[in-house]
Image: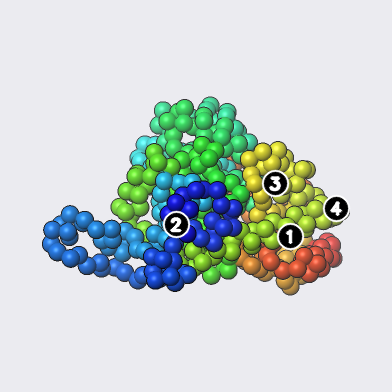
Amino acid sequence: MSDDDKNLGNWGVNTRLAHGGYDPRDYHGFVNPPVVHASTVLFPDARTMDRRAQKYTYGTRGTPTTDALAEAINELEGAAGTILVPSGLAAVTVPFLGFAKAGDHVLVVDSVYHPTRIFCDTIFSRLGVETEYYAPDIGADISRLMRPNTTIVHTEAPGSNTFEMQDIRAIADAAHAGGAVVMMDNTWATPLYFRPLDFGADISIHAATKYPSGHSDILFGTVSANAAHWEQLREANTALGVCASPDDSYQILRGLRTMGLRLERHQQSALELARWLEGREDVARVLHPALPSFDGHDIWKRDFKGASGLFSIVLKEPDASRQKTRAFAFLDALKIFGLGYSWGGYESLAVLANLADRRVAKAPAEGPVLRLQIGLEDVADLKRDLEAGFAAARAAG
């Protein structure tokens, strides 16, 4: 495809995923880009070296492999630039360190990814940055929490484990009025189903460990910025020396090629199971934003283009002394669902959600929360596996 074709911006999402970030004609027609392993890059002469007057100067500052992935992510995010980092958590901490300083106040949603909270409560605290946690449904009222020294408002939608939705546009407008940078962890939806920069966020964070990888074998993160914040993000990343490996970058780029098709299957299977689970007497609630029964469904329907394969159920067991026993029995009876952290791979996973870290957002009171990652297996088999879990939980009572 010519450069003009690539700039038209009217391709379908799967076409963009199949062709974004790399032109085979740049490397003798090979369909996939080469994996460039590099630390040292040679210069043709001393003057060029002194001025760093060539595209590539050192391995930490990019290679053709990492550029191919970054360009593909820019296209998906609608971003001015993207940095690549070695984990989803690094995708949070690098922009945090790049945009906050000692004496600052930052606002973080209370349903945030737990390792983000750990970073805020330890490293940020030691650096003299104060973190305040806010309710996910705060919307424009976040203006009431803004202070003169509030520099970052961090959002995540849906929220980790309990999937609360956030009105990103309303929050962004209020945060910008107070002079803060707005960041969003968009791992659940990916830029296929939601583009944070289109809704007022300045920084879009994505744990590419999940759906871009798709095979549970790579740790990776991407951070994309709008034009106003790109240079500061790039400067922070260069100063911190955080960079992703060429092999992992290649694997993520390869994963992007099929991510659209995989997400369609994840979404379809997860919704079928979520609707089925809603009808079960032993389930108090299904926490899935695409269900009309979910509190944040209207925001999801208004702003998002789709749903991924991750949601939670609340087992019906109000007796707190028996919740963990029932949950463990349920999990231990599963054969297809693996018991493991992370998600976004081809296999289904289940985990008992720990919500003890919540300070503002309340955990469901009806029973334990089990988070389910719906993989690419046949739905009928997953239903049978979950049936076995429910039977074991009932027997454990």
Report if the CB atoms under discs 3 and 2 are less than 8 Å apart.
no
Q: Residues within 10 Å of mark 2 (few under 14, many from 20)?
A: few
At label 4, the amino acid type is: Gly
Mark nearest the camera among 3 and 2 is 2
Residue 301 seen anywhere in this rendered image of the structure: yes
- Pick the residue in front: 302 or 358: 302
The label number, if any, that marks residue 279 in the structure image? 4
Quarter assignment of residue 397: bottom right
The disc, 3 or 2, on the residue closer to the chain's N-terminal end is: 2
Residue under pointer 2:
2
Q: What type is the residue that disc 2 sits on? A: Ser
Q: Position of residue 224 (x, y in %)?
A: 45, 49
Depth check, front residue: 227 or 117: 227
Q: CA distance from mark 1 to mark 3?
A: 15 Å
Please tell me which residue is depicted at 76% across the width and 50% down the height of the picture.
286
Residues at marks 4 and 2, CA–CA distance in whole angstroms: 52 Å
- Does the rendering let one see residue 86? no
Vertical side of 36 occupied by 95: above or below? above
Mark 3 Cα-neighbour bin, 10 Å: few <14, some 14–19, many ≥20: many
Among the two numbered marks 3 and 4 on one chain, the one whose residue lies closer to the N terminus? 4
Of the numbered discs in the image, which one, if any, rests on residue 289?
A: 3
Q: How is the image coloured?
A: rainbow
Distance (Cα) linking label 3 and label 4: 17 Å
Q: Secondary structure at mark 2?
A: loop
Of label 1 and label 3, which has the lower sequence position?
A: 1
Residue at mark 1 = 269
